[in-house]
Amino acid sequence: MKRIFTLLFSLLTCLGFSQDWTGINIPADPGTGKEWVLQENVSDDFNYSAPAGNKGSTFLSKWDDFYHNSWQGPGLTTWARNHSLVDEGELQLIASRFQTNRVNAGAVHSNNTIVYPVYIEIRAKIMNSVLANGGWLLSPDDTQEIDFMEGYGASTCGNCGSSNSNQVWYAQRMHQSHHVFIRRPFQDWQPSEFGSTGSNPSEFPTWITRNDGAGNINWRDDYHRYGVYWEDPTHLYYYIDGVLVTQREGMEQIDPLFFTNSVNQGDTNNDTRTGLNKAMDILFTVEDQDWRSNNSVTPTDAELANTDNHTLRIDWIRAYKPENTASVDEWFTNNLKVSPNPFESKVDIQSGVLLNQIQLYSIDGTEVFSQKNINALNNTIVLDKLSSGLYILKVENNSGSWAYKKIIKK
């Protein structure tokens, strides 16, 4: 940890500035023999100007000022490019009235995807509004989603009517969760509001409160840090202001309904679940969501006319990946697992990084097996036709590093 911040500080001093998060500790543990390395292509301190109508090359090198496909928005939302901008050192997403019963709002997505293992965190101040304020990750095919910030800031609502006028419950809770989807026919699963899995599910809520001694705080009242450590496809750890507040561990807490099956999604008799394994875009959005507007929870014209109350402010976003302090080749070799060994017909290969190709050589150097473009953490090869004896397994990861293992065919 000290090493990475020393390197960052030296670099930034040479450039004559420091990023907004310099000196702020990363709360997640990168693991033994690893350190956090900043991912520049998806990190941004927003210390530049990007006007709503012409955001310029600095912004557009990392971001697109719309949703990650052509969808116009949920419920009463109409996303608009001119409702996002960078000013005063922060990304601002604004909401206003578009047409009767509709809301124009900002939406931004990253030009680059991110994939586990990664710690991603923002510092943001949500709106004083019943509209949804979101910081989230979404796979390009819209089947896997991680929400590390989803907040509704207003305590009251002029349009809500007597049954929904009090919105304090939402104003005092921050939603942190994930979704897995089947697109056709559409199905959506996420953990229940207060947890539904594990031996003590109440320990892992999806709606987070914080008490300052005088009662639960309203999240709209100040800037807070919201983050998630997406460790691997079955482990998520959510943080607020550097404190671990909820988590999901294991496939049954990630996908109990088999929605991530690689074959026959939703078929509980065919367990080919991948968990949250897909590269994802980073999104910031403001939404008038249908599950709320259908119940008259939507802002009035007068409320939307107050721009300050309807601006989501994001001070910075940072993303880090854990990388090895040992040489990559040494780490890869030490962490590559091959079993069984000796083997009879099949060999299972497991790695902490994505595999690219596998080659197998006989003791005289003849190549007897080859498989390319694997792009997976684990792989099984069938070698039942080989003669008994000693072989050399050569495995390449997606970074171009090689590892070698001796294996024996019975």
Image: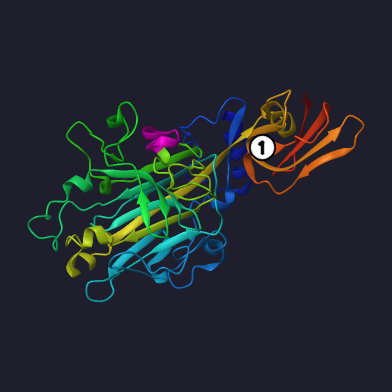
Q: What's the residue type where badge 1 is placed?
A: Thr
How far from the left and from the top, in percent, is residue 242? Answer: 40, 34
Q: Is residue 66 magenta?
A: no
The residue lying toward the viewer, choosing from 378 and 27, is: 378
**Going by the image, does 202 lie left or right of 50?**
left
Mark 1 is surrounded, within 10 Å at the Cα level, by few (under 14), some (14 to 19) or many (20 or more) other residues, namely few
How far from the left and from the top, in percent, is residue 407? Answer: 77, 26
Task: Name the residue located 75 percent from the left edge and 34 percent from the top edge.
Answer: 384
- Check the picture and name the quadrant holding the N terminus: top right
Q: Say above or below: 13 vs 92.
A: above
How far from the left and from the top, in percent, is residue 291? Answer: 25, 58
Residue furthest to the left: 162
The residue lying toward the viewer, choosing from 305 and 101, is: 101
Q: Residue 297 is drawn in which quadrant?
A: bottom left
Q: Give the range drawn in magenta.
A: 238-253
Q: Say above or below: 236 vs 333.
A: below
Q: Residue 410 is drawn in which quadrant?
A: top right
In the structure shown, which secondary structural element does the residue marked by tag 1 occupy? strand
Q: Residue 160 is drawn in which quadrant?
A: bottom left
Q: Say above or below: 187 vs 11.
A: below
How far from the left and from the top, in percent, is residue 205? Answer: 30, 36
**Going by the image, does 339 lie left or right of 231?**
right
Task: Name the residue located 17 percent from the left edge and 47 percent from the top edge.
Answer: 168
Number of marks drawn? 1
Question: Magenta segment, principal secondary structure?
Answer: strand
- Give the labeled residue for mark 1: 380
The residue lying toward the viewer, choosing from 408 and 138, is: 408
